[in-house]
Amino acid sequence: MATITYQTADVNGFKISYREAGTSGNPKLLLLHGFPSAGHMFRDLIPLLADRFHIVAPDLPGFGQSDMPAHDKFAYTFDNLANVIESFTETVGFDRFAVYVFDYGAPVGFRLAMRHPERITGIISQNGNAYLEGLSDGWNPIKAYWQDASEANRNALRAFLAPETTRWQYTHGVSDTKAVSPDGQGLDNFYLARPGAAEVQLDLFGDYKSNVALYPDFQKYFRTHKPKFLAVWGKNDPFFLPPGAEAFKRDIPNADVRFFDTGHFALETHSREIAEAISEVFSKA
């Protein structure tokens, strides 16, 4: 079994908690989680890849065990999340790496790639969107908040933070819900229930519009640099639709796009299949 260590890094005074596995000198792989999770979402994937990669999986600012300053002390924007994670990679010596992006991790990882294309050896996107056709109608309440940041529209989004919504995100589109461990969703709900966490998440809901505004820039990066690219997609995701995965091939014709019969949190049911896809694609010359 691979040894996984649990560490913290001081990133300009910001504590970032992270998991690390694998041997220094192996190809580097940065794992970036999504909402409302943290590095624990990779608990099944990391042991399957640690024999061939040097892996780090940080908790984003405001998530998991990383620092969560109050939202009036730290601006919770995706630009700022990317700023902290960029500094984190430099702190832990990740100079050239592949990046695995999921959900919120995608706009963070794509920002890093645009800023420093020379550092990126490849991208794995697991339900990490960069195209308008990938957004489902499930985004409509959040889009309403983008158009009118009223208190009523903000409060309407609190339903996304409820424990039953987290459970739904984990189980929607899964053929056998008994196969979904309670561990990840239980931790997610614990972190969401912390004092101040709701306002942090609502701020990020509001700022997600900055990611959609950057879609043309992300796509230009894909067209220009054509990184080695693997999309591994839960095809029953209620938020990020299969056309969003297929769209990557417009800008990266050699992108490898694979669908799995599962939902948003595809690693909960298909970690082994996804690990095999990563090993296959990233072992190619």
Image (cartoon, helix red, strand yellow):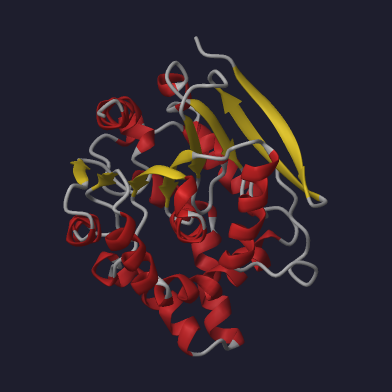
Would you say 48 lies left or right of 162 here?
Answer: left
Q: Position of residue 194 (x, y in %)?
A: 71, 53
Q: Position of residue 108 (x, y in %)?
A: 51, 57
Q: Tell which residue pokes out farthest to the top in this image.
A: 1
Would you say 75 lies left or right of 40 here?
Answer: right
Q: Position of residue 251 (x, y in %)?
A: 22, 61
Q: Tell which residue pokes out farthest to the right in this image.
A: 13
Please tell me which residue lies in front, 31 or 180: 31
Vertical relation: 278 (above or below) 240: above
Q: Position of residue 171 (x, y in %)?
A: 35, 44
Residue at 56% of width from left, 37% of height from top?
Answer: 57
Point out the image quarter for the C terminus.
Answer: top left
Any part of residue 156 in sight = yes
Residue at 46% of width from left, 49% of height from top?
Answer: 118
Any part of residue 178 in sight = no
Vertical relation: 173 (above or below) 49: below
Please tell me which residue lies in front, 92 or 31: 92
Residue at 58% of width from left, 88% of height from top?
Answer: 150
Callout count: 0
Please tell me which residue lies in front, 134 or 254: 254
Q: Tell which residue pokes out farthest to the front in this image.
A: 118
Residue at 67% of width from left, 50% of height from top?
Answer: 87
Please tell me which residue lies in front, 157 or 278: 278
Vertical relation: 251 (above or below) 173: below
